[in-house]
Structure formats: C-alpha cells, structure tokens
C-alpha cells in the first residue's frame, strides 16, 4: 500500500500539476479592497497564485485603501483588524468508559476565537499578529514581522516569528506545512488521547501534520520568493514558555525549506522539501520542552524530520480541482525526537488528498489517504487512514464543513480500546 502511494505521488509530481496558499485574514481584504476569493483557491484558507504573491510581499501590497504618506512613511490610513471564530460538533469512537462520545464546541469554549491585525508597516515591511482568547482552542497568540526588498526580481529579506512553527515564517504551499494552510478546516479534537500530536483529520491530509512539526517556536529566517518559487532558511528556539522570549536560549533548531513553482499543462504546480535539524531547548534546560522546571534527562531532545511535498491546482471539465501530496520521515534518536514520540523505529507518513469543486467557490468534495508507520515497535506501528469530507460556503468568509476519518492498522488494533479510530466533525468557521 505504501509503495503504491509513493508511486502515485511521484506520478502526480512529475506529470499533472497545482499551486499554493495564504492565511484567510479579512484584514488583508480590507487593505486590498478586494474580495476574499481574489486570494483564495476554492475556499479559505487555500491560496491561489495572487494570494501567494500578496503573502510573498510580506503583506505590503495595498489596493484601494488610502495611505498616510510622507518622506520614508507609507502606511494604511486604517489599522485593519479581523476576527476568527469556530463552532461545531465532533463524535469520536471508542472513548474510555465514562467519557462522552460526542462533544460540542463554541467560540472560546472548545472552539477557536482569535483577533488578527496587521498589514503594511512600510513599503518593505509587513506585520501580522494573532491574539488568541484564553479559552480558545488555538495554538496561542503569535506574531510575524517580515522585511523584504526587491532583489533581482525577487522579494528577499528576513521573517521573524513568535510562537508558531518555523514554517510560519514563509510558506506558499497548501500541503499542510503550516497548520493554517490546508484543505481540512478542522484540527481534530485536542481532548482525544491519540497516538499522534496533531488533529485526526489533518493527519490524513498532510505528512507534516502527522509528524507534528507544528511545535511553536521563536526565531527568524532568511526568505526569498519569486515567480519560480521560494526559499526559507532559519534558526529557531523550540522551547518557548508561554510566549516568553528566547533570552538565554540557543536557536538550536535549523529549518530549511525550498519549493519550485511552475505551470504545467495549464495547472499551477509546485514541489518542495522541508527539513528540520538540531535539538530542542538550551544548555541550561536541554529537554524541558515547554516548562523550564521540567526534569532534565541526559541528552537533548532532537528535532529532526524531512518532508517532500507537492500540489496541483487547476480545472477539469470546468471544475476546480486540487491535489496535494506529501511524504515525510522522522528518524529515531539516541535520546528522543520531538517528531517521533515513540522513538522505536523511523516514523513515516505518505499522504495524498484531493478536492473537487462541485459548485464553483461554493461547495467541494474531499478525499484523502494516509499510509504511515508511527515509530512504535513492529506489530503496533501500522497507522493508515481514509478521510471523506466536504465544504460549503455560506458566504466567502463563512464556511461549513463535514469531515469523517477512518483509521486502520495494528496501531489501533493493539489499543484497548482503540480511542479515536473514527471521528466525524461538523465545523462552522467565520472570519470577519
């Protein structure tokens, strides 16, 4: 099965074709004076080529909005804000006795509730901040400052981030390299104790999500993007404590990302690679991941993973189609590996997903497959899955999705009970 999926991914990346992404933040729609669909493919948060260009500019593009300008000053006349809220219902199979099978979520009550602001700081500097409410099902507040200049037809410079995965510093693909840029709107139910760190549905769609490379970080990258792709290389501290600074900490994880973007037979196409190397923590606190008071075992926790991904976005018979594929691995470590929690064998995942636009910019149907090994001992490490789903846009900024995931393999057969073997999620997302 795994070999077939690898061959299929190779065919997709070598024959047909697809493009990229950007965070669905209405603050930018206000800055540009353009509809959400101008930047997004099919539905938010997937990006089309124009959305990628806006993101690559470091959020500095400005459209119909007026500016306050003077010598060495060029800012929007309005500080643009946006809100994000989710509500829904999730049903998870095989919960332990006494635990509810289903659960409702509301904004800031199991669902997400965040406030965004950002945009153009100057001609070459942009900013984005996410403020998560205390009880929100969110990774927490985060920020990004991007400083880029035109260099030989590229936008080149620095991206500095706080409390997000290193990929957040610059990412232009919809393959799940960052949690905010993917086909599936639901991250899964974080209350479910499962074998992996990310959401059940996201784990089927993306190898990066399955490996759990979204651990929050502080740091910065050299970034460069142009019509043929982008590069992101940086140093990060994967030991943030409640959003605290990286003072006295080593930037001990290196993140390297490169992607090639091109057109093939009328399809927007992209292929890329991600690599995480190094370790977590610092000399004074080698392994206390998020708590400086945590015990300090001998040696560091490694942060090592490699992912190859690609996408195709275009049309078939007048219907928008997106195909997303990724394969990743997290090796075993002599101590431990943040991205391979079992650390008995190499953790691997090959994922492929597709989305068909049934009603243009209104309704889609989704299908995804995963063939994986979770890094546990042989006999309990097979971790495969199928995901079925669909989305319906009540408006360009309000989306309803229904997603069902069925997991299989001896990783679940060995569990008693196999918590989370199936999960169904109905999710409402609103951006305003």
Image (tube, rainbow, N blue to C red):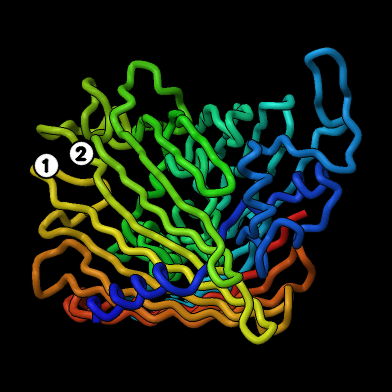
**What secondary structure is found at the residue carrying circle 2?**
strand
Q: In this view, does 188 lie to the left or right of 3?
A: right
* Residue shown at the point (21%, 40%) measured from the top left: 302
Image quarter of residue 27: top right
* Residue shown at the point (26%, 42%) measured from the top left: 303
Q: How many marks?
A: 2
Q: In which quarter of the image is the N terminus?
A: bottom left
- The answer to whether one can see residue 98 in this image is no
Circle 1 residue: 335
Q: Tell whether label 2 touches label 1 (CB within 8 Å).
A: yes
Asked if 12 appears above or below 60 in the picture, the reply is below
Q: Which is nearer the eye, 315 or 345?
A: 315
Q: Quadrant of the C terminus?
A: bottom right
Q: Which is nearer the eye, 161 or 58?
A: 58
Tell me residue 396's x, y (percent): 77, 65
Tell me residue 156's x, y (percent): 55, 31
Circle 2 residue: 301
Tell me residue 381's x, y (percent): 17, 70
Nearest to N terminus: mark 1 or mark 2: 2
- The answer to whether one can see residue 29 in this image is yes
Tell me residue 132's x, y (percent): 60, 43
**What secondary structure is found at the residue carrying circle 1?**
loop
Image quarter of residue 10: bottom left
Q: Which is nearer the eye, 244 or 348?
A: 348
Label 2 CA crowd tier, 10 Å (few <14, some 14–19, many 20+): many
* Residue shown at the point (33%, 26%) measured from the top left: 251
């Amino acid at each position: 099965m795994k070999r077939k999926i690898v061959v299929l991914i190779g065919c997709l990346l070598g024959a047909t074709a697809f493009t990229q992404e950007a965070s669905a933040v209405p603050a930018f729609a206000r800055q540009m004076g353009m509809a959400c669909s101008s930047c997004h493919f099919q539905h938010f948060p997937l990006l089309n080529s124009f959305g990628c260009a806006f993101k690559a500019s470091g959020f500095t593009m400005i459209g119909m909005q007026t500016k306050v300008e003077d010598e060495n000053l060029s800012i929007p006349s309005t500080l643009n804000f946006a809100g994000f809220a989710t509500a829904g219902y999730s049903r998870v199979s095989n919960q332990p006795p006494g635990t509810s099978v289903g659960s409702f979520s509301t904004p800031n009550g199991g669902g997400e509730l965040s406030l965004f602001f950002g945009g153009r700081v100057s001609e070459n500097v942009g900013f984005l901040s996410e403020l998560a409410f205390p009880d929100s099902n969110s990774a927490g507040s985060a920020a990004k400052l991007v400083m880029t200049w035109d260099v030989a037809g590229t936008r080149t410079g620095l991206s500095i981030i706080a409390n997000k995965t290193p990929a957040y510093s610059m990412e232009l693909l919809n393959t799940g390299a960052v949690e905010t840029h993917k086909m599936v709107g639901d991250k899964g139910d974080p209350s479910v104790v499962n074998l992996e760190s990310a959401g059940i549905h996201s784990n089927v769609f993306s190898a990066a999500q399955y490996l759990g490379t979204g651990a929050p970080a502080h740091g910065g990258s050299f970034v460069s993007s142009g019509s043929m792709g982008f590069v992101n290389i940086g140093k990060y501290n994967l030991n943030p404590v409640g959003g605290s600074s990286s003072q006295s900490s080593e930037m001990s994880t290196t993140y390297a990302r490169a992607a090639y973007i091109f057109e093939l037979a009328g399809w927007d196409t992209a292929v890329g690679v991600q690599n995480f190397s190094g370790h977590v923590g610092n000399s004074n606190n080698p392994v206390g991941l998020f708590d400086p008071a945590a015990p300090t075992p001998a040696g560091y926790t490694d942060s090592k993973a490699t992912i190859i991904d690609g996408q195709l976005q275009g049309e078939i018979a007048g219907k928008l189609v997106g195909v997303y594929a990724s394969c990743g691995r997290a090796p075993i470590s002599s101590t431990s590996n943040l991205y391979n929690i079992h650390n008995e064998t190499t953790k691997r995942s090959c994922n492929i997903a597709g989305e068909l636009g049934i009603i243009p910019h209104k309704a889609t149907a989704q299908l995804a497959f995963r063939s994986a090994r979770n890094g546990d001992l042989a006999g309990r490490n097979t971790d495969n899955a199928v995901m079925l789903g669909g989305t319906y846009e009540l408006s360009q900024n309000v989306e309803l999705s229904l997603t069902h995931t069925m997991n299989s393999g001896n990783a679940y057969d060995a569990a008693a009970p196999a918590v989370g073997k199936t999960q169904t999620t109905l999710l409402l997302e609103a951006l305003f």
